[in-house]
Image (cartoon, rainbow, N blue to C red):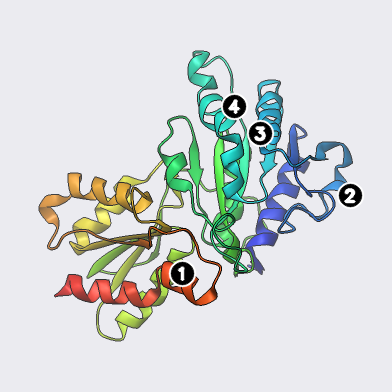
Amino acid sequence: MPKINMRDALRDALHEEMARDETIIILGEDVIAHGGPYAVTRGIYEKYPLRIRQTPISEAGIVGTALGAALCGMRPVAELMYVDFVTCAMDEVVNQMAKVRYMFGGQTDVPVVLRLPSGTARLIAAQHSQSLEAWFMHVPGLQVVIPSTPYDAKGLLKTALRGKDPVMFIEYKRLYTNEGEVPTDDYTIPFGQADIKRAGQDATIVATGPMVGKALEAAELLAAEGIEVEVIDPRTIVPLDKETIFTSVHKTNRVIVTDEGAKRAGVSAEIASLIAEECFDVLDAPVKRLASANVPMPFSPELEKLVIPKAEQLVAAVRALMG
């Protein structure tokens, strides 16, 4: 399989699905002029000039338009420049998009995909560096997707574009340039199907987004000490593949949950609580969590490094679990 980066994998998914389904449309800021803030939509206008619209700077307008288009039979893909700016459209996301199917008794589909560049990159400070997936995880009616590799990104986006429900598609900005093998044949990845990125029997790390790579790095370092770590990537946190996670915990009896959002009330907290509730009897040690500090993201590169969890911290956490 050829190696491509995540940006190209996402772009390929959009091109292929737009060729397959003429109801897919794209809207967002700079999606024509620059191919979006991270060039994912580059080339769409040249192939499908009537199916892509560059919008004003109004996140409420972008999401509201996407919802209306979905209710009228289209499959809109709306890109917000940064996930942070979804705060300007929370009514449209939380009170409308997430609840329309329920409010109308299942009479309508809501196939909206919101592409949301997330996390730290290029030292863009507190208003452009957040990881907000825990917010969306809390809202019934939203599906929440977090790819960590180009392969996962393409397969998951294709699934989102063929679905019937609203999807918050979290794209960690630092991962856009990461390369990996991606098939040229058509494929999809079902939501709610975690991936075992590395097998092991001594401890489990459940990781999302950029923490998957750090978990694999930590696993390599620990392997040199004779400790074999299993790394689980949920890929979607709504729906969440509890079975794969619980099976791993039953095998290793020790688990760390890590994500890049703020630790308080975060994704790692929800997954850790599920493990504590349903796997308590097999645990040889308390569930550990590793996430970002509960502070706004600093602009300073040295301070930013102190906020985000590191592979070395995962190594230390596993050692502590092993006693």
Instruction: Determine which residue is flagged by label 1.
Output: 213
**Cα separation between marks 3 and 2:** 27 Å
The answer to whether residue 29 is above or below residue 128 is above
Would you name the residue on which mark 3 appears?
A: 60
Q: Is residue 143 shown left or right of residue 22? A: left
Q: How far apart are marks 3 and 4 (CA)?
A: 17 Å
Q: Which of 91 and 106 is in front in this view?
A: 91
Residue type beneath disc 3: Ala
Q: Which of 151 and 222 is in front in this view?
A: 222
Residue located at (27% from left, 58% from top): 248
Q: How far apart are marks 4 and 2 (CA)?
A: 27 Å
Mark 3: secondary structure: helix
Q: What element carries label 4?
A: loop
Q: Where's the N terminus, which quadrant?
A: bottom right
Q: Quadrant of the C terminus?
A: bottom left
Q: How many marks do you count on the picture?
A: 4
* Circles 1 and 3 in contact, beta carbons < 8 Å: no
Q: Mark 2 points at which residue?
A: 46
Which amino acid lies under the numbered mark 1 shown in the image of this protein?
Gly
Name which residue lies at 70% across and 35% down: 62
Q: In this view, does 247 lie above or below 201?
A: above
Q: In the image, residue 278 lies at what x, y percent?
A: 19, 45
Q: Is mark 2 on a helix, strand or loop?
A: helix
Question: The disc labelled 2 sits on which kind of residue?
Answer: Glu
Residue 236 x %, y %:
45, 47
Confirm whether residue 38 shows in the render: yes
What residue type is disc 4 on?
Answer: Val
